Each structure stands twice: as structure tokens, then as C-alpha cells.
Image (tube, rainbow, N blue to C red):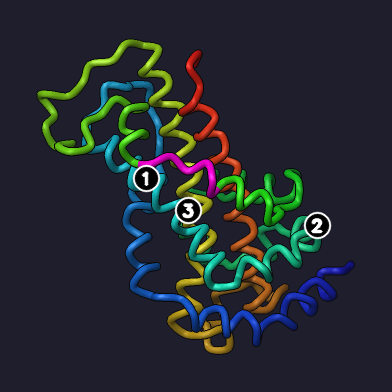
Amino acid sequence: MSVNDFEGSLSSSAQELNRCLDRLDYGRLRGLAYPLQRSLYMGGSDWDLPPVILAHWIEAYSASHDAIRVIEESGIQKIVLAHANEIRKHVSGETLPIIDSYLVPLEALEVAISEARTLPALEAQTLMRIKARQIDAYTMGGVLVVDTVDPGNFPMRYRVDEKVGQKRLKIGALIAKAASGAALAVGNVSLGVFGGVFTLPALAVPATVGIAAGIVTSAYTGLVSACDALDKIADEARSKNS
């Protein structure tokens, strides 16, 4: 299938996509933006972090799961999954909306594109498994060893050893990846809710694809990256040996 055929196939879903966008709560999408955006950047090797930062990680983790639920409840998930194999073949910087490079760090975007092309095609069963494996905030607080009731109390923070500290950093990096994927998945959807598929600015997508194709491709790319990270977070959080 050529890029033109790919664009035509996804653009034929524009009417259905608009109906999905009509089901979304823009306020809910806006509410996801802050916890996701403030956890996109991870770096450093110091695990003795302020409890409030760890609390932000937990909020971003929950928001990443909620972003997936938003895609599912709106019906966009069905469109994304129906075109999964086509998207895997054609996803690139040329078929994603230009705004994606502003939504998440460039390195995270490049990783997400690579994974969308190389990881197995996303399936409904995968999304169901990810949802079933979500860890509640209290349990995640225990894994990261942070008081989620009063995270602002830095002097009274829990001191942890290197083993727990390394686990903190590993989970934190995965949460940053999940947040990036979730931001991609719902970022363009948010624009669609505001303006509709047919009224989005032309600059939102590259000239090679239409607006509907760009939104669906971005949603798929973000979902793949977020699901991969969330699955690994569940493994890491439940591991007794890491």
C-alpha cells in the first residue's frame, strides 16, 4: 500500500472520527495535560528525590492509564485498531502531525515511532491486559517508598537503599515514557475535540497525509509506546528481586 492509499484509507474514517470526538469531554482531556506534561523529562542518577516529585510520578502513571481509557471510551480505539497494520507500515515523521514534535521530547517521539513500526500490532486484548494490570496509587506509593498522604514533607521523607533507589529510577523512566505515549495519544485528539477533524489548522499535519490520518496515526503511535511502558511498570512494581 502506497502512502497515498494509506492516507485515503484513514481519511475515509473522518466522519466516524468526528463522531468519536463529539463523545469526549474536553475538560477531562485538559485535566490530563498537566500531570502528563510535568513528567515527560527524566534524567539523573539521584534517587533521593523530594516526595512531591515521586507523587507527581504516581499522578502521571494514573493519567497515562486514564488517557488510554479516554481513547477506548470515545470509540477512537476501534478506528486505531482497525488500521493497526497499515499504520505500522507507514508511521514516520512524515505521517505524524507536526505538532507531535512539540507535545513530547524529540527523543521520546523517535522511540515511539520506532516502536510503532517494530512492536507487534496493537490489539484489543493488549489494551484489556494493560487496564487489568493497573496499580493503584497507594500500592505504587509503597513501591516507590513515598508518603502519598503528605508528599510535601521533604525533611520526613523515607530514606532508601541503592536497590530501592535504582528501582525508583527505573520506574520513573518508564513513567516518563508512558506519559509521553499518552500525551501523543490524546494530544491531537484534544485539538480535534476543540475544532473538529474538518476545521483543524492545515499546519497540524504534514502535506503527505490528511488530518484524520494524522490524528489516528498519532493516537496509535502513542498507545503503543504507553502500553509498552505501562506493561513494564507492572512487571517492575511486582518484582521482588529488582
The residue that appears at 52% across and 79% down in the rendered structure is 21
Residue 132 included in the magenta stretch of the image: yes
Q: Position of residue 88 (x, y in %)?
A: 76, 56
Q: State the image coordinates of residue 199 (x, y, percent, origin top left).
A: 53, 88
Give residue 204's position: percent from left, percent from top.
Answer: 55, 74
Residue visible at 41% across and 33% down?
172
Nearest to the observer: residue 81 or residue 6: 81
Give SS at disc 1: loop
Secondary-structure class at tag 3: loop
- Give the residue furthest to the front: 132
Q: Position of 29 compared to 214: left or right?
A: left
- Residues at discs 2 and 3 in contact (Cβ within 8 Å): no
Dot label at residue 104: 3
Mark 2–mark 1 Cα distance, whole angstroms, equals 30 Å
User: Element under label 2?
Assistant: helix
Query: Is residue 163 rendered to the left or right of residue 234?
Result: left
How packed mark 3 is, by other alpha carbons closer than 10 Å (few <14, some 14-19, many 20 or more), is many
Q: Amino acid at mark 3?
A: Val
Residue type highlighted by circle 2: Lys
Q: Earlier in the sequence, mark 1 or mark 3?
A: 1
- Tell me the distance, in whole angstroms, between the alpha carbons under discs 2 and 3: 22 Å
Magenta-drawn stretch, dominant element (helix, strand or loop)? loop
**Dividing the picture into quarters, in which one does residue 215 lie?**
bottom right
Query: Which badge, 2 or 1, comes first in the chain's sequence?
Result: 1
Residue with the mark numbered 1: 39
What's the amino acid at mark 1? Ser
Q: Which residue is mark 2?
A: 89
